[in-house]
Image (spheres, grey):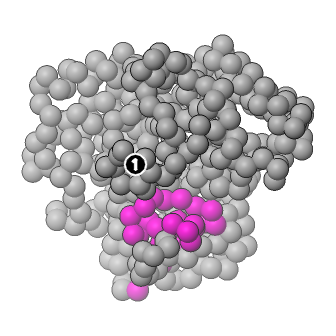
Amino acid sequence: MADQSAYSDSAVMPTYGRANLSFVRGQGSWLYTADDKAYLDCATGIAVNIFGHNDPRLTAALHQQADKLWHTSNLYRIPEQERLATRLAGHAKLEHVFFCNSGAEANEAAVKMARRFKNRTSGEGCYKILCAGGSFHGRTLAMLAATDKPLFRDGFGPMPLGFEHVPFGNLNSLRDALSDDVAAIMVEPVQGEGGANAAPDGYMQGIRAAADEYGCLLIADEVQSGMGRTGHLFAYQAADIQPDLVVLAKGLGGGFPVGAVIARRDIGEAMGPGSHGSTFGGNPLAMAVANAVLDGLEEDGFLVAVRERIASLDGYLTQLQHAWPEKIIELRGAGLLRGLRLGDDIAVGEATRALRDRHLLCVPAADNVLRLLPPLTINEDDLAIAQSALEHFFSEVAAT
Ligand SMILES: *Cc1c(COP(=O)(O)O)cnc(C)c1O
């Protein structure tokens, strides 16, 4: 089955390299085609369906809200939005939350907030945002400038000014690039698209210290790594640091589109009525679902169980790598955001296709990395099925 960027019978713009495959329903960790073929979902719509598919709690929350009220806009108070804001802010030890609809939009808002805050506290010209090599922050123009992937910018220039990149994981380079005109350092605690790269030990703490020293803000882009994926609600919590802005999307709605920026009180206060907005942001449907998602993550023992699944997956992946060290050059990532860096003789696109043919859904990432993003609720049996599909795949490529 060949990937194609366009299908001649489709009026959908050919911006994606889509598989010629579609699903009509999902249950738990599995997706089903119209002819009822089952696929194990270790892609989760790119780290979105954290409770798998058709979770009864999320479905009930959406139905209940759909029967009451869909949308009123932010001209009026939205009680479910205020409730979610209080809860998210509490978890992040911050005070203000802005809601939008996607990760790119949320990152874009976080950059606006950082710039506004520095503008008000340090004056004009302190607008620079330091980003990391291999970063991915979204596809709006400003987030293309923040993303370290020149190919994504091809033909879309000029790019917004004020974004600079330093090698991910290297504190010396970061410190060399810091100056008074930096508004914020923006970083993914575990890079997703960039190849499932976990921040090395001490890196997040070092960024925090450098940001404090230079008086700039720390934006944690937790769009992919957040919402329990690493066994912590937010991945930065493993490093025991405090960001000034935390950006969420993907898993926040468990499949319902929603994004959020959590900010320190004084950063929120530097924004004010009219400074930013979104027609749909934080609408009652999204808020009902996201509150239900948070209920699930807050359930007693839930994250503990996620950490057990993480340990199982880690065990499986370590075994695989021991068996095929030439095919799996490196294990990367953290938690349930894991990557297998493949040997140069296996193209990750081919591997993704071959695994899909074995009914295991994975996602390619940069650096020839095969990325696994299972639901946080994946059970032991399904993890073993994923391992077996990977084993068959690697034994087959080892034989050729
Ligand atoms: C996916 C992703 C984004 C962009 O989110 P969209 O909802 O696609 O706009 C931003 N940052 C990170 C880390 C991501 O993984």
What amino acid type should be assigned to the residue bearing mark 1? Ser
Q: Label 1's element? A: loop
Please tell me which residue is depicted at 13% across the width and 39% down the height of the picture: 71
Please state the horizontal and vertical placement of residue 82, each as a whole percent of the image. 23, 40
* Residue 324 appears left or right of 92: right
* Residue 318 appears left or right of 22: right
From this view, report whether residue 160 is shown above or below residue 234: below
Q: Nearer the viewer, residue 95 or 335?
A: 335
Tell me if I can see residue 50 in this picture.
yes
Q: Nearer the viewer, residue 64 or 6?
A: 6
- Tell me the quadrant of the picture where the C terminus can be found: top right
- Tell me the quadrant of the picture where the N terminus can be found: top right
From this view, report whether residue 375 is shown above or below residue 257: above
Please tell me which residue is depicted at 43% across the width and 79% down the height of the picture: 157
Highlighted range, magenta: 125-152
Q: Which of 113 and 6 is in front in this view?
A: 6
- Write down the quadrant of residue 282 in the picture: top left
* Residue 151 appears left or right of 168: left
Please state the horizontal and vertical placement of residue 346, each as a whole percent of the image. 78, 47
According to the picture, the residue beneath numbered tag 1 turns out to be 8
